[in-house]
Every structure is written in C-alpha cells, then in structure tokens.
Image (cartoon, rainbow, N blue to C red):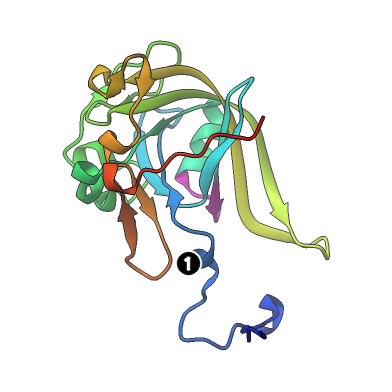
Amino acid sequence: MTTETYFYEPSKGHGLAHDPFNALVAPRPIGWISSRDTDGNLNLAPYSFFNAFNYVPPIIGFSSIGYKDTVRNVEATGEFCWNLVTRPLAEAMNETCAMVAPNVDEFELAGLTPAKPRVISVPYVQESPVAFECRVTQIIQLQGVDGRKADTWLTLGEVVGIHIDQKFLKDGIYDTAAAQPVMRSGGPADYFSFGEEQRFRMFRPK
C-alpha cells in the first residue's frame, strides 16, 4: 500500500497556508525564563524552543529568535531561572509575551510574585510549582549548512537548584500529570495541556 506524502524543501518554501514546522515538532514544553539585567531590572519571557538535554550535569536550553532582552541579560549575568507553565498560569504566561521596553517588569505586568532564589540571584515565579535555578554554560549563535549565521541564539544552562511544590511529590515521585503542564504547538495560538487520562506506561526491554 502506497502512502502519498506532502514533500517540500524548506529553503524553497512550504506552499501551505501556514508553515507547519512548529506544529510537526510539537507539543513542546515552554521555557518560561526569568532573568535580571545588570541594573537589576527583572525580565520574564516564554520560549517555545526549549527542552532538557542532559542528566549529569542537568542541562536545559532555550533558543531565542533574535538577540532579545533575555539573551542579553543571561549573557551579562550568567544566570537565569526556568519556571514551569501550568494550566492555571497560562494566561499569566501569555501576558509575558507582550513586546515591552527592557525596563518593564513582566512579573508585575502579569501579576506574578518574584520568589527569592537559593543559589543564584535571579528570582523565580512563586506561583509556578516547579522552577530551576540555572547558570549559563554556553550561548551559541546557530548557523545553517551553508555556514551563514542565523539571527537565533541557543542558551544552555546547568541546573544548580530545583524547587518543587511538595503536593506534586507522591511517594517520592514527581506527578507530571497532576501539575497540568502547558505546551506550545503550531499555529498562532495553539497550546496543549494534559492530565491523568493521557497517561500510559511502557517499561524498557531488559
């Protein structure tokens, strides 16, 4: 049985109503990154190109299209926090997407509370049930196969402190579904969340 596929070369255009790339690599966890500039101004911004990349040491990363305030801050200070976006925090996260001046505090804009960190100097979102305090390990400007630099910056950081709301720890195991994480999908406004009904288990073969 033959399956027809829609094929395109990205460099020549997708020919569709909306670029499908973001929807194909989805849903993705959101990098809700808090940072501080050298003058002490706070910044909080979500990044949909985000994930974890290593266990030991624990390393996470986010990619910024354009050299934005967050990248500028973390490069200058060497620190940032990742904050988990949950369904109850989705609207607040969306507020922090606003294009505002560098001196505007998105914590205040979205009605969120800066919580005192333990290891670094950048506060995390107190309302978020999970937060990672991170120190920058690498900032990489991405490039294509032709060697041309993209206007995109990948920031990698080692997690040096982790905050977890204890109500999501059950018998010493973090309950991912109970926290109702929010993930980004394709399209201009598509997000996903999930709960216990989406859980299934598969153990690795021995």
Q: Position of residue 192 (x, y in %)?
A: 33, 55
Q: Is residue 10 visible?
A: yes
For the N terminus, the quadrant is bottom right
Crowd rating for badge 1 (residues with CA inside 10 Å; few <14, some 14–19, many 20+) = some
Indicate whether 195 appears above or below 203: below
Q: Position of residue 129 (x, y in %)?
A: 28, 28
For residue 189, which quarter of the picture?
bottom left
In the picture, measured across the screen, residue 2 lies left or right of residue 89, that is right
- Residue 66 among those drawn in magenta: yes
Q: Position of residue 19 (x, y in %)?
A: 52, 76
| Residue beneath the point at 29% across and 19% down | 170
For residue 199, which quarter of the picture?
top left
| Residue beneath the point at 52% across and 86% down | 16
User: What residue is pinned by disc 1?
Assistant: 23
For the C terminus, the quadrant is top right
Segment tinted magenta in the rendering: 63-69
Count of numbered marks: 1
| Residue beneath the point at 51% across and 51% down | 49
| Residue beneath the point at 20% across and 50% down | 91
At mark 1, the secondary structure is helix
Indicate whether 64 appears above or below 186: above
- Residue 54 among those drawn in magenta: no
Mark 1: amino acid: Ala
In the picture, measured across the screen, residue 19 lies left or right of residue 206, that is left
Q: Position of residue 34 (x, y in %)?
A: 39, 34
In the picture, measured across the screen, residue 143 lies left or right of residue 166, that is right
Indicate whether 192 appears above or below 167: below
- The residue lying furthest to the right in this view is 146
Q: Is residue 105 visible?
A: no
Which residue is nearer to you in this view: 34 or 22? Answer: 22
